[in-house]
Image: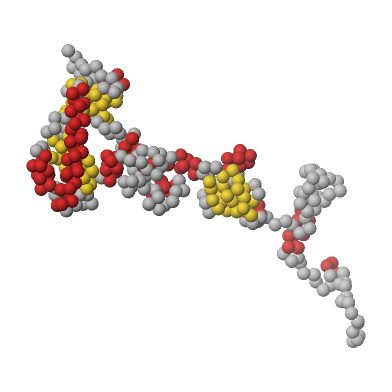
């Protein structure tokens, strides 16, 4: 007889957590019903992971053995106890209303042998003394009564139902655990921040906000931020809004003073990184714009020859970029500073030009 473990995955509810047990020598397939020992006593579970679908070294905890394969009598007994628990739940709710206890009973369920019934309840208080109620219910039902407090999400999972999307609740149909949800996820997906519009029947934020959150984050990383200034092929523009579904940006062209809607993907394909922060563009172009053109100097055009060496008719040191040579450059600099003041006698002792107007009397 081999002592090797044969783990098998068992689930007790439709979308409940999977627990592992040791199948031993039982031949089990997916869909088989088994009787196992739990903290509530004997219970019937359904095999969802066959022994050949899980590795023994992946399960680290100690495994309880499978008691037996469930028989038709076991399944019939479970259904009878389920109907009995529903009737006793209604009576327990009536007693809670009479006593004025601050709690709301959600559901009740028996173990397989009927020795214990477990009631699940919610309460606004973190701690509540339910011992007198448990004793009264135990005397009325003639069995052991256990009371367990659950949260609002667990209450919705137990009661099941449909939401505004028209589908069954995810937590009751297939979701085995509750994800962590924040209002930031709704903001990232451009959803209304009104809690009444993004909350489920449990009163908490929709679990489905986490389903597409990473996809929206990836899309938003490819789009410019709303309110930022960007540089486009037609000039500077301000981002008014972005549409993540169509991947388009609505821009306000500051020079043309008009609104333009452009596909961001098409811009990147045609012009590369076209949508750039305008601060980066200004930092690059500012030194080029600060260089003033010399007075009388024409910018180079296609008609100018591309000669780099001085010709015979050009002054000494003149080139295509500096046609007047070094002397001309010096005179231009002196002219920008105001030039030298001429002496009354003129430069080199030559007489200066007399002022215009009628001559005065000679002395």
Percent across and percent down for residue 10 are 25, 27
Percent across and percent down for residue 286 are 62, 54
Percent across and percent down for residue 192 are 44, 51
Quadrant in which the C terminus is drawn: bottom right
Percent across and percent down for residue 219 are 49, 41
Q: Which quarter of the figure has residue 211?
A: top left
Task: In the rendered view, tell whether residue 215 sits above or below residue 24.
Answer: below
Q: Which quarter of the figure has residue 13?
A: top left
Residue 140 is left or right of residue 258, and the answer is left
In depth, the one of 66 and 346 nearer the eye is 66
In depth, the one of 281 and 70 nearer the eye is 70
In depth, the one of 168 and 85 nearer the eye is 85
Q: Which quarter of the figure has residue 3?
A: top left
Quadrant in which the N terminus is drawn: top left
- Identify which residue is drawn at 34% across, 34% down: 174
- The residue at the far top in this view is 1
Q: How is the image coloured?
A: secondary structure
Task: In the rendered view, tell whether residue 47 sits above or below residue 86.
Answer: above
- The answer to whether one can see residue 26 in this image is yes
- Identify which residue is drawn at 41% across, 46% down: 185
- The answer to whether one can see residue 57 in this image is no
- Identify which residue is drawn at 29% across, 19% down: 52
Total number of numbered discs in the rendering: 0
Residue 281 is left or right of residue 133, and the answer is right
- Identify which residue is drawn at 60% across, 45% down: 262
């Amino acid at each position: 007889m081999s002592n090797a473990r044969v783990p098998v995955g068992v689930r007790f509810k439709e979308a409940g957590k999977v627990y592992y047990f040791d199948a031993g020598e039982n031949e089990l397939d997916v869909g088989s019903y088994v009787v196992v020992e739990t903290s509530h006593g004997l219970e019937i579970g359904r095999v969802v992971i066959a022994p050949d679908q899980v590795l023994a070294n992946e399960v680290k905890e100690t495994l309880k053995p499978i008691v037996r394969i469930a028989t038709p009598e076991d399944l019939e007994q479970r259904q009878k106890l389920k109907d009995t628990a529903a009737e006793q739940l209604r009576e327990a709710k009536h007693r809670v209303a009479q006593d004025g206890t601050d709690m709301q009973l959600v559901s009740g369920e028996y173990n397989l042998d009927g020795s214990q019934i477990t009631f699940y309840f919610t309460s606004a208080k973190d701690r509540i003394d339910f011992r007198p109620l448990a004793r009264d219910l135990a005397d009325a039902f003639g069995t052991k009564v256990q009371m367990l407090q659950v949260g609002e999400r667990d209450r919705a999972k137990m009661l099941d139902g449909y939401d505004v999307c028209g589908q069954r609740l995810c937590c009751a149909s297939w979701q085995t655990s509750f994800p962590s949800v924040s209002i930031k996820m709704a903001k990232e997906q451009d959803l209304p921040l009104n809690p009444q519009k993004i909350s489920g029947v449990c009163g908490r934020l929709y679990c489905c906000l986490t389903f597409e959150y990473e996809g929206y984050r990836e899309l938003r990383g490819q789009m410019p931020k709303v309110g930022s200034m960007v540089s486009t092929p037609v000039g500077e523009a301000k981002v008014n809004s972005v549409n993540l579904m169509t991947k388009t940006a609505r821009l306000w062209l500051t020079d043309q003073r008009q609104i333009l809607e452009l596909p961001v993907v098409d811009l990147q394909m045609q012009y590369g990184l076209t949508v750039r922060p305008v601060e980066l563009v200004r930092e690059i172009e500012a030194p080029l714009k600060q260089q003033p053109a010399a007075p009388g100097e024409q910018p180079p055009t296609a008609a100018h020859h591309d000669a780099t060496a001085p010709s015979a008719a050009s002054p000494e040191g003149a080139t295509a970029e500096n046609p007047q040579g070094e002397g001309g450059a010096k005179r231009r600099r002196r002219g920008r500073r105001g030039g030298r003041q001429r002496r009354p006698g003129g430069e080199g002792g030559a007489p200066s030009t007399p002022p215009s107007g009628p001559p005065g009397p000679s002395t």
